[in-house]
Amino acid sequence: MTNARILLVAAVISACGPAKNPNPPGPIVPAFRGLLATPRQLAFTCVVPGCDTTLTVKVTSNVNRRVAIKRIVLSNPNAEYTITSAEPPPFILGAASDFTIDVRFQVTSAPKSENLELLVTYTDASAEESADRIEAGELKVPLVKRLVGEPLLLATPQTLHFGVVPVTQRKELPVTVRNAGFGNIALEVDRADSGVAALQVNLPANIALVPDAGVALPFVFKPLEEMYLKTQVELASSTPGVDPVYVNVEGTSYAWPRVALEPEETALEFGEVPKNSRRSVRVQLANVGGMPLNVTSLSATDPTNRVTVAFQGGMNTALLQPLQRLNIDVEVNGLMPGVVDVPLTIVSDDPARGMLIIPIRAVITEPKLQAAPLTIAWGTVPQGWVVSKPVELRNIGYGSLTIKRLTFVGGTSNLFTFRNLPALPMQLERNARVAFEVEFRAETNAALGGSISIETDDPEDPFSEIPLTATGGSCLDGCPITNGTPACTMGACSIGSCNTGWHDTDRSASNGCECREIGTDPGGFCSTGVDKGTLSDSGSSANHTGIIHSTDDEDWIRFFGEDRGQVFGDDYDVRITLSSADPNISMCISRYATATGTQCEGAGSSEQCGIRTFRKDGSYLSEDGAMYYIKVYRNPSNAATCTPYTVYMQNG
């Protein structure tokens, strides 16, 4: 391109100029209209007691209007801060102007975590409404403490010994508390709790400790009566993150020797000690009095020689100065199983407790299994029968016995099975017992046998066995019917009849006639039932206990409820209650307004059935005497049980 052409293009561009915006922008308006702070927060780095720091914040208006500054305050009152404004509020700040505020921080206590702000409240200075008027607002400037490091409270010494302080006298000992932390965080010590009126801790107000700083606190023991002082004083700080410290304090005001055992126990409990093992404890005998204590005897009377006691070093006598201690070694030797309960006897010249007796208790453990029976023999069991025999396991030893497994020994017939076996393993304490059953099914005509293996932690016999023997036979070989007469029908062994007073409630021949009547079975008709006579309305009562042994069994009971004339009121009140653990037993009540006879049906009767409670009270103006007939029966849709019932009858 020639120079002429270049000049021509440049001339054209210059003539056309840049493209014009059809909507030219107006004046720039800030996103926020009001007051701004520089810096946005004030950060104080010197925060320990004695610091005195002043920081300045510049407040600028970003609007071309006058602004009314109404007030300048802290969000929460705080005496450590002083606010000084270049112009005291309220005042008018010119358009787009600024002013300064000085914040002085004078530290007098340990710093606390707090959310503190400098607040500047403002509004538009003009009373006229206009489009560019600013909204009322509040400028917030956070006041931040630059806390670094970690405070740590320590007390020295950790134990104070006041020795002997006579009653009404006082003794003072110092404890130094120190901030062993680092950084610029001070801590306050503002709580000292001894829990004892005779011990006072003089805690000055406003203790603020910078790192490595400390202060001595006077501990004063002033007993107003004879006493032994042993306590723990808690020294605590409200500064966040600071754990309390504890000072152990001891002293006495007793004017004579006084014996004590430490730790103070009502008994020395060793718990369970396995046989052939040893267990020992060490306790301390202390003289908490103000004069020397002479211990003339230390002993434990044990005829079995399972307990020994002695002062450390093997001595049985000692002389203890005030607040002196001496170790006592007590040992239990598990020579033989059983309960140990012998006295530890300490004889001294303590005028108040010349003989101190502390029980020593332990159990020397050796669990021992007792199985009953030792053998289980079914004899001859008719073919087709299933007969169960009970087995009981008992711990007759000392300590808990663990039953680990119950199994059949190899070679045992599979016609023997367990029933109601407990969940294993299980623990049996001394004299505790557990039971289960072994079932034999007579499915063949043969002699069968086997054994049960019982695995426990019995140290003498960890594996016990119970032999099992049974013979399956025909009905002709033997048909045993307990409390009854057998019958062999089509080769099956069954119950021919039950002995008087016995019943076959569960319809099982294998256990015979298992249900025994209580007393005499009442008649099955109301006229022949049990007669309880007359129950007067003076509070007479009667009761009857029986068994409904089958679904068609019925027991009848009757009595006459007498209504005697009364001068005031009427005491007649007949109540009948049936009680039984079998929910299928109920009663019917029939009432006849007659004093004689044994009517069971006819005009005037009232019958209530399927009930367990009945009540009929009287009327003062009428004769309410009546015969009551009670029928106790079983719901025929439910199987019979050999469960007793009792009927309670009362009048008045």
Image: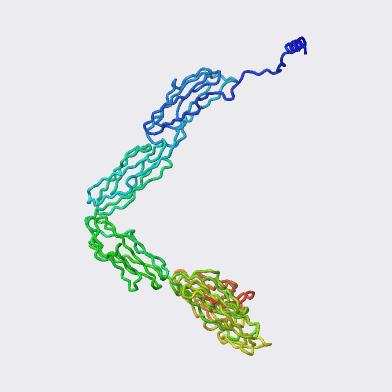
Indicate the quadrant containing the N terminus: top left, top right, bottom left or bottom right.
Answer: top right
Count all numbered tags in the image, as a single digit. Answer: 0
Which residue is rendered at x = 55% and y = 18% of the image?
Answer: 64
Residue 355, by quadrant, is bottom left
Q: Residue furthest bottom?
A: 476
Q: Quadrant of residue 313?
A: bottom left
Front residue (pair 389, 499): 389
Q: Quadrant of residue 376?
A: bottom right
- Tell me how the rendering is colored: rainbow
Q: Nearer the viewer, residue 421 or 27?
A: 421
* Residue 135 spot, x, y in % from top left: 55, 24
The single residue placed furthest to the front in the displayed view is 2
Q: Specify whether residue 506 is in view.
A: no
Indicate whether 290 appears above or below 646.
above
Q: Position of residue 219 (x, y in %)?
A: 29, 45
Q: Is residue 364 left or right of residue 615?
A: left
Furthest residue toward top: 4
Q: Is residue 273 left or right of residue 35?
A: left
x and y percentages locating residue 457 in the rendered image: 49, 71
x%, y% of residue 450? 58, 80
- Is 287 or 123 nearer to us in this picture? 287
Q: Can the viewer see residue 54?
A: yes
